[in-house]
Structure formats: C-alpha cells, structure tokens
Amino acid sequence: MLIPQRKRDRQEPRSPICSSQMAVPGFSLGALILLLHISSVANYPNGKVTKSCYGMIPEHGHTPQSDPVHHISVSQMTFRPGDQLKVTLSGPPFKGFLLEARDADDLSRSPIGSFTLIDSQVSQLLTCEDIQGSAVSHTSPSKKTEIKVYWNAPNSAPNHVQFLATVVEKYKICWVKIPGPIISQPNAFPFTTPEATIARLSTLPPVSHLTTSFSALDCGNKKFCIRNPLNCDPEKEHACFFLSFTRDDQSVMVEMSGPSKGYLSFAFSDDRWMGDDDAYVCIHEDQTVSIQPSHLMGRSHPVMDSRDTLEDMAWRLEDGVMQCSFRRNISIPGVKNRFDLNTSYYIFLADGAADDVRIYKHSQRPLITYEKHDVINSPKNVGGSRSSLLLKAHGALMFVAWVTTVSIGVLIARFFKPVWSKVFFGKAAWFQVHRLLMLTTSALTCIAFVLPFIYTGGWSWSAGYHPYLGCIVMVLAVFQPLLAAFRPALHDPRRQMFNWTHWSMGTAARIIAVAAMFLGMDLPGLDLPGPWKTYVMIGFVAWHVGTEIVLEIHAYRLSRKGEILDDARIQILQSFTVAEAEGHAFKKAVLTIYICGNVTFLIMFLSAINSL
C-alpha cells in the first residue's frame, strides 16, 4: 500500500471485518434505509471495536453469509427490570464476535442494558452509546466455539428485547447481526414482526469486468495522468504504473493500472507524508479484484471504508498486470474521509503484496508527485519520485565522499609524495591536496549523516545494519582529521605508530563505508534499480583495487630498477633521474584515467538517484 514514510512508523496487518449486512426480523423500514447508509469501520483482533457498536458491521469488503450457523440462546424468555439472564453464543469455531441487546420494536436504537462477563479471558465489555458494558466482544483472534455472559435488564427496559450478534469465522467468512431470541416482559403484548421488515438489505455494489486495457492517448488533454516511468503506455508496457482522472460533469472516472499480484493503491494527501489521507485500494483476491475506498491514519494499515461512494467499478487481470476503475463524485458532503477533489493534493501511487485480502507494506516506496495537483480542472501528464529529496541527498553526498574524494585522496598520499613534493603554502603540494580531499570527505559525511535522522525524525529500526555501519563510518570520519591534527614530527619516535594508526582507521572507514553503501542501495528509501547497481558497485571496488595494484607494481619495479643501477654503479644519477621522471609521468597518467573512471561511476550513481 501506500507506501512514503514519516508521520508514524509501524505497519502490521490487521484483521478487518465484512461490509454489508443481512436482514433480521424486527427491522423497521426506516431502520433499513438508515443502515444502508452506514459507513463501516475496521475491527481489530483485540476486539476493541467500540466504533462498530451501532452498525455491528465488520469491514472485509466481502458479502456476509446469509444463513447463520451460530446460535444465541438465553436462560429464560421473560424478564423483569433488574433481572440477570445468561446469554450463550455458540456454533462452529469463530475468531471474533460482537454481542448486543436491542429494542426488538426498533433495532436501530441504542443497545439495551448491560452485560456481566463470565470468562474475561475470551470476552470483554465495551461502552457503546455512552452505556458502560452494553456490548461484548472477543479479546483475541483465537478460535472459540462458545461464549457465555450475563445480561442485566435495566429499569427502563422496553417490552421486547432481541439479542444480535456479528460473528467472524475467518477473514472472508462472517455473519452480520445474527438474530437471537426475543425476550419479553410478563405483561407485554405478544411481539409481531411488521411485513416491511422482511425485505433484505442490498449486497455490495456490482463490479464488472474490463474488456480492454486503459489508454494514455488523452493524457494531458482530457485526462490527468500520472505515469511511472514517465510517458509509459499501459496498453503496451507491462511495467507501466498508470493512474488517470477524467472529469465527467460532477463526477470523476479513475483508472489505475500496474504490475502487481497483490494490490495497487493511490491516495490524495495534503503533504508528502503518510497520514490522514483519502486512499483507494484494488486488491487481487483469488481471480477477481476487490475495489475499496479507505483512509490512512499515519503509517498504519489502511482503514477500509464503505463502498457506497463508488460507482461503475470494473477490473481486469492479464499477464501479471492489474487494472481497476471506478467513478466517484467530485464533492461528497457529509462523508468522512472522502476529500473534495476541487482542491489540489499530492498524489501517492503504491503497490505491494496481499494475502487473503490482507494487504501488507508496499514492496517499494510509493511514487509521490513532485507538487500538489488539481486532478479535475487541469489535465496534465506528470510523473513523480519514489524517494525523498533528503534521502537522495544523503545517498548522493555519501557517494561523492566515499567513491570520489576519499579514493583519490588515498592514492595521492600513498603514491604521489615524490611526484608533488614542491612546497605549496608551507606544506608539500601532495599533502595539501590530500588534506583538502579528506576534509571534504569528512564534511560531506557529516552533512549526509544527519539527513536520514531529519527525514525519519529519529532512528530507523527497519533499515537493518546500514545505520549502524553508517555511525561507525561517521565516528571514524571525525576522528581521522582530529588524529591528523596531532601528527608527530617526521623523526619523532611516535611517528611510525601514528602512521599505522592513521592508515588502519582510514582503511577501516573505507571498507565499512563501501559495505554500508552496498546495504543502503537496497533499502526502500533509496531503492536503486537493480541488479545493475550491485554490479556497478562491484565494478567501482574492482576499479579502485586494480588501480592500487597497478601503482604498487609500478612502485616496486621502479625501486628494483634503482637498486640494480646502484649496484652496477653505472651512470647512477642520470639513469635514476630518467627512470624517476618516467615513473612520475606513468603515475600521472594512471591518476588521470582513475579520476575519469571514478567520475563515470559517480555519474552513474547520481543519475540513478535522480531518476527515483
């Protein structure tokens, strides 16, 4: 699902409940019409379903079963105010339930009386309509076959009371408002069911099958289109993520397409962070697609809403591509969580895995438009980014620091001391260049280090080993220049220890930085297109190691040549000077080629980051 990150951080699959209702004896026609317009709310495995008290409607997006297999029984059929009756809900194993008592003459009214628990391990009391203990629900999704509670008759009890139960056997199978026995006060007239209440409630809105693929021909003309990759064609490219909006008087037709075996979703948002958004999900279920409006509350599982606001729903599955479409009104007054589309919004487009209609975290970061757009009044053809600007900057700065500046600085210190030995501003030229490059590396690392913390607002527990390695690199990048500031004099006895410590810390920092970059490239926040990214990174490592080996071999051969000339004592000074000059020219040529190669690798990485 939608998937940008920040406002909150966790995402666990929940068990939602079903969406329409089944008729029960005792509904008045007015109650029937009212219930048809109820917006459902999601239920939770822990049974905290207070918001579902009124409608008793679970949210699965599935039609509830019509023939109940669970039963409600009571210990007596008559009652007086103040009596306590035992109520039993039983049947085949089930995971969730909601039990209430209602006025049998008007089942749309608030729950009647209160309950007392018999086993608090499997059931719990809920406060509905400000009446404490007026409903009972499950405490966990563990299977159960029987629930027993006591019902306490209030002093203001009506003449006839009926018990109702909603039961969830599993995600796709549930029964809504199972009718239980009707109990009466001793002097009440016999209860009769009005004929009007026999009418059944409507099922879910019809969904048809698309016969042809969506077209991008009218994008920017009649349609507002979001495409990834930009300008891709959903008719010809299976890897094309496509979302379009076409205005039709006071409604808008929405088309969504993309490669997914789980779900596709999009959302309207006031900002680039996830939370408080108007979202829509198309879920691959068996061989069909379920189209569901929802809303997002932070970085949690989307809360499914009623489908009453959607019309003309249709879908298509072919060659691993899911397509779905629906129509909704531009403005839906009085319906919570549905945004007015006359306003500009950021738009998120995401995909991910689904199992048994449960949707899980998006497989890659959601595509987010670069700016807010009015999808109704301004047809355009736009793209978006799957990565935050802060995370892009983090990756880019780290690549510049540890692919370019530090690598060149290491080669200069190791092999170019005799090449650039002239004094420049009081120090040898090679040292000034080396120091500049290393300070630049430390500065870039410090800047890059804080960006992910700004983005996430703290530590990212889902980023694996990458942040831990990054912290180690940061510490070493700060200690290295501090250590260099206390470098002993050339002939000081401690100089050799300094050299080995400086070299060891620098080498460790480079190795750990490369490992961190390998891990960082696969994180959702900077998910570079693969697998070429791995090959390019391996290529860079091989390029650097190969260059060092070439220069080491050259330095060894140059030293051996000097030793031979010294032993023969033939034209020693002149020959060695010529060899040294040739060696310097070779090193400069190798460095030039190496820098060109490094810049090439860097451009490849930066281009990939910019394309996200």
Image: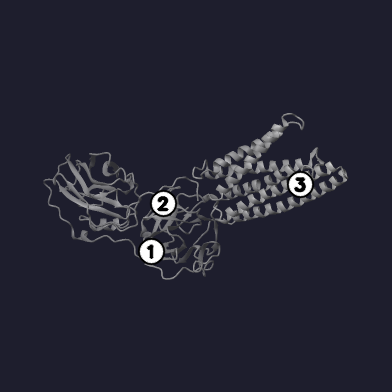
Q: Residues within 10 Å of mark 3 (few under 14, many from 20)?
A: few
Q: Which mark is residue 311?
A: 1
What numbered label is drawn on residue 302? 2
Tag 3: residue type? Arg
Q: CA distance from mark 1 to mark 3?
A: 80 Å
- Looking at the image, is mark 2 or mark 3 earlier in the sequence? 2
Q: Position of residue 263 (x, y in %)?
A: 43, 58
Q: Nearer the viewer, residue 280 or 123?
A: 123
**In the depicted view, which residue is nearer to us: 573 or 316?**
573
CA gap between label 2 and label 1 equals 21 Å
- Please tell me whether mark 2 or mark 1 is closer to you in this view: 2
Going by the numbered disc 1, the residue's amino acid type is Glu
| C-alpha gap between disc 2 and disc 3 | 67 Å
Report the residue that reaches farthest toward the top. 493
Label 3 sits on residue: 557
Q: Quadrant of residue 82?
A: top left
Residue at figure coordinates x 53%, y 54% from the top left:
386
